[in-house]
Each structure stands twice: as C-alpha cells, then as structure tokens.
Image: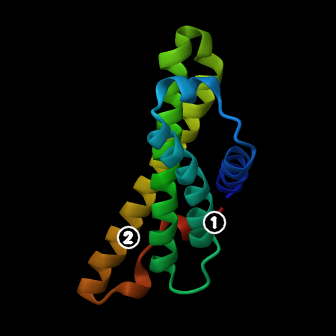
Amino acid sequence: MFALLTVLIAGMVLLISGERPRSVTTAMPALVLLLWEIGLVGAGVIGLMGVTWRGQLSTGLAVELLGLILLGSASTMYAVAVYVVSGWGAVVAGSYVIAAAGASWWRAGQIVRDLSRVARAASRGYIADVPLLVQEEP
C-alpha cells in the first residue's frame, strides 16, 4: 500500500514540477515519457482503489491487479532507462527500482492465482472454502 501511495506522490510531483530524471529524458521519447508519468499516477490511484475496495473481494483484487501491472511496467521502464544511461554506475538505484518492479510483478502473480482459485471454486460451488493469500492468518 505504501509503495502505491509513494508512486502516486512521485508521479504527481513529476507531472506538476516538470522536472524529470536525466535517465528517462535521455532514454525515452517524449510520448513514452508522458505515458510513464501518467502510468505512475495511474498505478497509485488504481492500486489504492483496489487495496481499499469495500465491495466484492474479487473485484477489489482485480482493481489492485491493474494498478500493480501499471506499477510493475513503470518501474521496469525506469530501471531499464537508469541502466541504459548510467550502466553499472546505477547499480544501487537500479537495484531498488528493480526490487519494486519485482515486488509488483510478484504480487500481481499472487492475485492472479487467488482469482483463479475463486473462479475454479465458483464453478464447483465451493466459493466459501477458498483459501486466499489476502486472507491468511499472520
């Protein structure tokens, strides 16, 4: 949840301030750069909507999944830009960005697995007995 909030704030700052990291201005054409910034904001807004969804659980998971796909895509784009422009000089910053992208893709995979379990259980009439990752006991 904090990653989604952080990416929302970072995307808004980029859009409002007009300041861009050198790596993305060098590596991305203007249209791709704009889509990357919008993707950051979209990932935050959509992902947070999914996380805080008060309706049906599967709908909230699907909304969160969309936000995570956007976050994973935007983070991967940034990591590629950082390494293309700075090479091994970007190993620390790039590693953090790759970790964020990996975490987004990992969580997206978990949600896909959960939604698949729900769909299989619903087709068999066992919807109440499906263990989901989001409902595991600590």
Where does label 2 land, which residue? 115
Q: Judge depth for marks 2 and 1 and give the one in front.
A: 1
Quadrant location, the C terminus: bottom right
Of residues 81 and 120, which is closer to you in this image?
A: 81
Q: Is residue 93 left or right of residue 131?
A: right
Of all residues shown, which one is farthest toward the top? 88
Q: Residues within 10 Å of mark 1 (few under 14, many from 20)?
A: many
* Camera sees residue 14: yes
Q: Quadrant of residue 41?
A: bottom right
* Camera sees residue 136: no
Q: Residues within 10 Å of mark 2 (few under 14, many from 20)?
A: some
Q: Quadrant of residue 116?
A: bottom left
Q: Amino acid at mark 1?
A: Leu
Of all residues shown, which one is farthest toward the left? 123
Numbered mark located on residue 48 in the image: 1
Of residues 6 and 108, which is closer to you in this image?
A: 6
Numbered mark located on residue 7 in the image: none
Give the percent coordinates (x, y) of residue 1: 67, 58
Mark 2 vs 1, N-terminal side? 1
Give the percent coordinates (x, y) of residue 136: 56, 66
Q: Residue at position x 73%, y 50% from top?
A: 16
Q: Is residue 52 above or below residue 16?
A: below
Q: Amino acid at mark 2?
A: Leu
Q: Quadrant of residue 55?
A: bottom right
Display colour scheme: rainbow
Q: Is residue 93 left or right of residue 103?
A: right
Q: Is residue 88 above or below residue 51?
A: above
Q: Is residue 52 above or below residue 42?
A: below
